[in-house]
Image (cartoon, grey):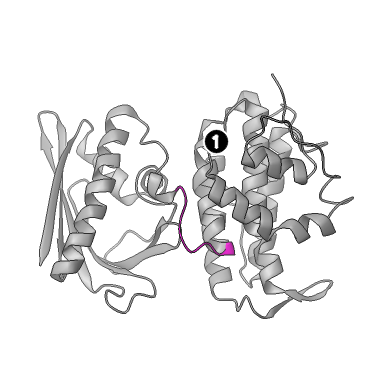
Amino acid sequence: MSFTKSVVLPVSPDEAFALVTEPERLRRWQTVTATVDLRAGGSYRWTVTPGHIAEGTYHEVEPGRRVVFGWGWDENPELPKDASTVTITIEPVAEGSQVTLVHEGLTEEQAAMHAEGWDHFFERLERLATTGDAGQDEWAWAPEGLTPLVAAEAALAAIQPVLRALTPEDQPKPTPCADFTAHQLAVHLLDSLVRLGGMAGASLTVPEQGSLEDKVSTLTGQAITAWRAVDLDGTVATPRGDAPAAFLASILPLELLLHGWDLAQASGQKLNVSDEVVTYIHHLTRDVIAQGRGRSFADEVTAGADSDAVERFAAYAGRAPIRA
């Protein structure tokens, strides 16, 4: 069976093509992370929502006009990589561009499930092209089956809007993380992601180009991919000796959530993250924070009576909000 979806976007065909192919654009409406090798024979790997990874191979690429790619899901034997085919065609119209998606090679049940997904994401695509902001994806808000790596993806999805909204004027501002300006904290977060990926055997490098959101999203995606190949029930070698893999993997969602909150506080933003995700990461990393007091974390502070879940988590990590 096949499914067809069409939408008219108030943008040029080239911009519409970018929205459906470029990682930075994809993250604004359809994915949390995206790796793309945009050429015939190249592959892609998208974390569509936390814990759900689509992957496949590009078959045809006509910039500004058409892209055809295989579609499947990681660790899904019923619809593995390249088991179905997606064709996206872009045509100029008076209002801008008509984007038509045809998804073929599905069973009746798969077609119904993917129709729901494409309807959801094409509504977000239309909202992004029309208003400039699709908003946070409710499907990424409180994912089921949380693990350290799924929680890292959920934390990344929550902090991405904060990272996108940062401006050069925010760089010298103080943060709740003592002795770090917003710029210094951003550099620290990038370095931490490189180190965390290295613990899982990956050789990561901070991208030279791109926004902070792009750099953090790219490195996080690479680090998570590396950690997915690690047995979290085992150990990982570190300069200080072997350490439990699960303990080290839990640092990834901790770094993202806590430093995302730090940067939101520095820039006067609100970090919107579900209580479910915060509570999971809080319990997951209590020992990490406790063992790091005096080095990476200060002593616990008392959270205000009106504090939300993420402020209570930050208080446990030794941070207090920056009050206006």
**Residue occupying the point 41% across, 55% down:** 49
Residue closest to the far front? 305
Tell me the residue that label 1 is attached to: 162
Quarter of the image containing the C terminus? top right
Residue 6 shows in the view: yes
Q: Is residue 135 above or below residue 203?
A: above
Of 132 and 322, nearer the camera is 322
Circle 1 packing at 10 Å, graded few (<14), some (14-19), many (20+), is: many
Q: Does the magenta stretch include residue 284?
A: no
Q: Which residue range is magenta in the image?
A: 141-148
Farthest top residue?
324
Residue 138 at what x, y percent from top left? 39, 44
Quadrant of the rendering where the N terminus is positioned: bottom left
Q: Is residue 213 above or below residue 265?
A: below
Is residue 56 found left or right of 206 in the rendered image? left
Please state the horizontal and vertical placement of residue 293, each as a whole percent of the image. Answer: 86, 52
Q: Is residue 60 visible?
A: no
**In this rendering, position of residue 53 left or right of residue 242:** left
